[in-house]
Image (spheres, rainbow, N blue to C red):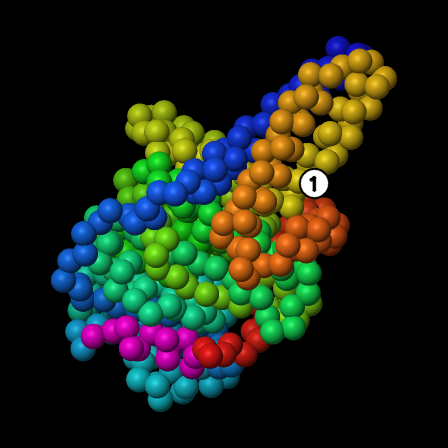
Amino acid sequence: MFLFIDIVLFAISIGLLIPTTVLFLECSIALLPISDKTGATEVIQPRIAVLVPAHDEASVIGTTIETLLPQLTTQDRLLVVADNCSDETAEIARKLGATVIERQDLEHRGKGYALDYGLTFLETEPPEIVVLVDADCLVEEGTIKRIASIAATQGKPVQAAYQMEQPAHSSPKDSVSALAFLVKNVVRPSGLARLGLPGLLTGTGMAFPWSVIRQAPLASGNIVEDMQLGLDLAIAGHPTLFCRDAKVIGILPQQEEAAKGQRTRWEHGHLQTLLTQVPYLIKASWEQKRFDLLALALDLSIPPLSLLVMIWVAATGLALLAGIWKAIWIPLILLAIAGLMILVSIVGAWAKFGRTEISVWTLVAVAFYIIWKIPLYLAFLVQRQTKWIRTDRDIVDAG
């Protein structure tokens, strides 16, 4: 019995030590005073098509288009796919100067289907580079040219830094969510990029050479289709580059139910992808003799931060009881090391990347945020979300 407890606790501590070590290395390298540039030489701006999938986005799409149009030249195109819309999304986009195509197919819902529909439309006069932008975000000036130029030069997908800003009347929970998003979408990819390793696609602000994106399997209802797309392309030999100096901004939803729904979709999709794709990436890494795929598998193996902390707290409690009861201390020592690495990673990321926008009190609110997330993870075990559901939008203000 005691031997069994020893083995289980040791296995848990080693299992947690792997993702926490990867997290620590990624965040630590991102903190080093090294240039964030990708090293790619900019070329004459290629012909670009910006593709915007939109489902009932009348409240926000106007602001998004207004941030995109000034960044395009006369040779570029802005294509909005009004997908299963029941509002004025298409009319607003047309009035602002975008090319709009409409799709109605209630049997096949989701962003992936809309993207595939848009690419099919572009086939008659394909661009050199396709940039994918969600209809509810703000694209910082110069971002389109920067990521499109790198994609054209390197012949690979490029991901801009995708950050979430807090709503006007934010809560401590919003601050913690923004911090977790910052760590996942900016800090960790920065560390990987400095090591010359690929990262994940994060949903918007993505540039692809036409020859790469047109071969990709997009038409699906996957709830984290962007993450899966990045993995598929990496295995096919087109790993994603990260561009820190290009920025796309989203706004965390103010409505409680909308925020909960958004987090559920993201994190259930992340966990499902983690469970199914990490073994596949490791196998592909071995078969293709590619270390970058192994690095991608290790990065993907890091669960959402709140879940990682939650598991660590539970495991540490059990290890402490085992130490007191049976003087089994090795698992507790390993878990203490893992906990220290998690703490240093989060605090370090906040200090360098988020201190000006995220209050120090956010770190204190982490415990309450984790408690709020417990039902979300329990739902993954008993009733996980598998279908794409659009998040209700707040009105986005470019100013």
The percent coordinates of residue 253 (x first, y second) are 60, 68
Q: Is residue 274 left or right of residue 204?
A: right
Residue 247, picture quadrant? bottom left
Residue sitting at the far left: 44
331 or 47: nearer the viewer = 331
- Is 251 situated above or below 202? below
- Tell me the quarter of the picture where residue 332 sits: top right
**Is the stretch drawn in magenta largely helix, strand or loop?**
helix
Q: Residue at x 24, y 54 (%)?
A: 150
For this view, does 113 lie left or right of residue 348? left
Above or below: residue 67 compared with residue 108:
below
- Secondary structure of the residue carrying tag 1 is helix
- The residue sitting at 65% across, 73% down in the picture is 169
List the single residue furthest toward the right. 325
Q: Does residue 157 appear anywhere in the picture?
A: yes
The front one of 224 and 180 is 180
Q: Position of residue 294 (x, y in %)?
A: 40, 31
Say if residue 301 shows up in the picture.
no
> Which quadrant of the view contains residue 287?
top left
Residue holding disc 1: 310
Q: Residue at x 47, y 34 (%)?
A: 25
Magenta residues span 61-73
- Percent coordinates x, y for residue 207 in the rendering: 30, 58
Task: Quarter of the image for the N terminus: give it.
Answer: top right
User: Residue 147: within the magenta?
Assistant: no
